[in-house]
Amino acid sequence: PPVETLLNLDEIEEVATKQISQKAWAYYYSAADDMVSKRFNNEVYKSILLRPRVFVDCTKCDLDTSALGHKLGMPIYVSPAAMARLGHPSGEAGIAEACRSFGAMQIISNNASMTPEQIVKDASPDQVFGWQLYVQIDRKKSETMLARINKLKSIKFIVLTLDAPVPGKREDDERNSVAGAATSVPSGVKAAERTSDDTPDVSGGSGGVGQQLFAGTDPSLTWQETLPWLAKQTDLPIVLKGLQTHEDAYLASLHTPQVKGIILSNHGGRATDTAPPAVHTLLEIRKFCPEVFDKLEVYVDGGIRRGTDVVKALCLGAKGVGIGRGALWGLAAGGVDGVRRTLQILADESKTAMRLLGVETVDQLGPQHINTRMTEQQ
Ligand code: FNR
């Protein structure tokens, strides 16, 4: 069906699922173990209630915001996710084209299926990208990559992912490698920045896609060693991704000015199963170390399916909200237009929710607009 007829993110996922290869589906859909965190990431938003205020003029409403001082058209961004070309040939560059139409930010994965140069090639002057790093055991590889990233004007910050020093056990993905020949993906799709010795072409080879991509990733990272090393490789601001406790959010806040932001995330439930959803971590930070919100920009991702989910995260103090699978499903369902549709739906739903709450701008959203009692009792 034409993507314009799809009304919500679930419908887009349904269409995408029918169109892509079994192997690509399993890689995108899968999460660790029993997928408890993946499910809960979304369910937790349903346990937060909105508190609409009435008799307020809601003629106007806009989603304008910023990230690390850069203007954005909406607080919804695309999370770093590997291997977009498994879903559609336009790949990460297609996602970039869709983001351009909305002034939306995109974080490029270290394991993207296109080079960062290709992805930002047609960027508009005000388009905002981050680049996500998985530090390699062979540090020279990461240093060479960072030197390339430093030269790309569109890339405004580095995201260091910390929640997956080793990949989670993603059974849908691994089952596929066992099924072997029964699966097929477009040939030649691979992580553009990995050499053939650390990443075989994912259309062949054994092991799930996730397992293959993590070969060569350094599990020894620490606050003491890795942050000073990274600060030597780049002057770009650093954003730490994958924080899941108030303790770690607080530690991050001690590393300003290099660290300018954090992303609360459990990797879409793909790393530690039963790890908390970002909403729980937001609530912990609000309770135990609210000063973190003054020192760092706090982002969240995981389980975003509706504009009301976006709005609730913003009410709790998130500066922006990432979508991982949502963008990939959009791409798989309809290429650039599919991602545009995904972003349009989330933007429209977010605006409707804001207007019904009696709010005109993103900045006006706050804890007064939600009731988290059910979430806190869980
Ligand atoms: C991811 N994610 C991820 N994160 C990261 O830092 N680097 C990466 O390369 C990837 N790759 C990746 C691939 C796929 C297929 C998925 C689904 C996810 C995690 C991603 O950035 C984000 O945290 C989650 O996807 C958010 O959850 P939702 O929106 O998918 O529910």
Image: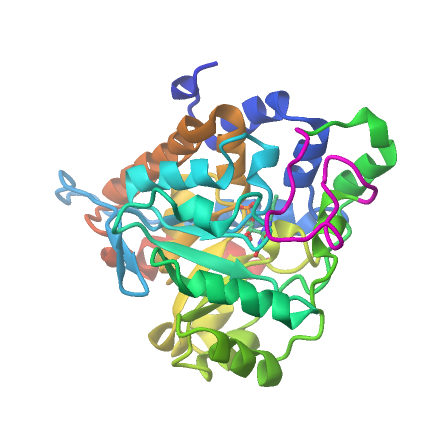
Residue that lies at the very extreme toward the right in this rendered image: 178
Q: Quadrant of the C terminus?
A: bottom right
How far across and how far down the image is residue 337, in percent? 40, 27
Q: Main secondary structure of the magenta part?
A: loop
How far across and how far down the image is residue 373, in percent? 47, 58
**Between 49 and 139, which is closer to the camera in this rendering?**
139
Examine the structure image and report whether residue 204 is included in the region drawn in magenta. yes
The image quarter in which residue 26 lies: top right
Residue that lies at the very extreme toward the top in this rendered image: 1
Q: Residue at x 58, y 32 (%)?
A: 87
How far across and how far down the image is residue 169, in percent? 78, 51
Q: Residue at x 25, y 50 (%)?
A: 125
> Which region is colored magenta?
186-207
**Between 63 and 371, which is closer to the camera in this rendering?**
63
**Between 240 and 188, which is closer to the camera in this rendering?**
188
Examine the structure image and report whether residue 372 is included in the region drawn in magenta. no
Q: Is residue 89 left or right of residue 319?
A: right
Q: Is residue 156 left or right of residue 274?
A: left
